[in-house]
Image: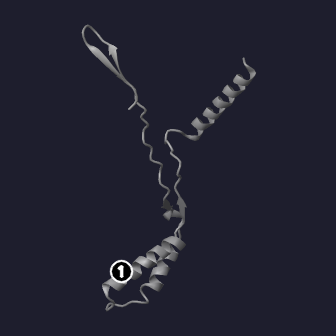
Amino acid sequence: MGEVDRVPGVSDHQGILASSLVKARYRRPVKHRIYLWKRSDTDAIMAFFSYHFMQEFDIHTPVNQLWSVFKVKCTEILETLVVSKWSSEHFSQPWITGDVKRITRQQKKAHAKASKSKS
């Protein structure tokens, strides 16, 4: 909180004028992996599962062991066979398209040019 002052008000009332330095908190977007399943080779994924998972285990294998191996194999498949990309850490607004960015750059360039020429 900054300064707090009393100011004359209407009639016999006084007003209070308060100044403060408030800054909105901004959370930066977290970078995360995006899997592109349409570009991945699903046949290779199926072959990987059928070979490594179905051949190694039978009906008498304990469920906990099956789950732990299944989990490890899924993460291995995600790392090796599924195409992925990283999301951007930049704050992006969906209404700012490429055209809007181009017009903004042109406007900034024209403003800088006009301020240099003092016209």
Q: Residue at x 73, y 24 (%)?
A: 116
Numbered circles on residues, count: 1
Horizontal and vertical percent position of residue 60: 31, 92
Q: Which residue is mark 1?
A: 67
Q: Residue at x 32, y 90 (%)?
A: 59
Report the front residue among 72 and 28.
Answer: 28
Q: Residue at x 49, y 76 (%)?
A: 76
Q: Secondary structure at mark 1?
A: helix
Horizontal and vertical percent position of residue 98: 59, 40
Q: Residue at x 42, y 42 (%)?
A: 25
Occupied quadrant, residue 100: top right
Kind of residue indicated by mark 1:
Trp
Q: Say if 66 sits above or below 83 in the image.
A: below
Q: Say if 14 sits above or below 57 in the image.
A: above
Q: Is residue 66 left or right of residue 104?
A: left
Q: Does residue 81 appear anywhere in the picture?
A: no
Q: Does residue 78 appear anywhere in the picture?
A: yes
Task: Residue at the far right: name it.
Answer: 117
Viewport quadrant of the N terminus: top left
Q: Is residue 68 left or right of residue 100?
A: left
Report the front residue among 9 and 52.
Answer: 9
Horizontal and vertical percent position of residue 115: 70, 23
Occupied quadrant, residue 65: bottom left
Report the front residue among 30 and 77.
Answer: 30
Report the front residue among 61 and 114.
Answer: 114
Q: Is residue 79 left or right of residue 21?
A: right
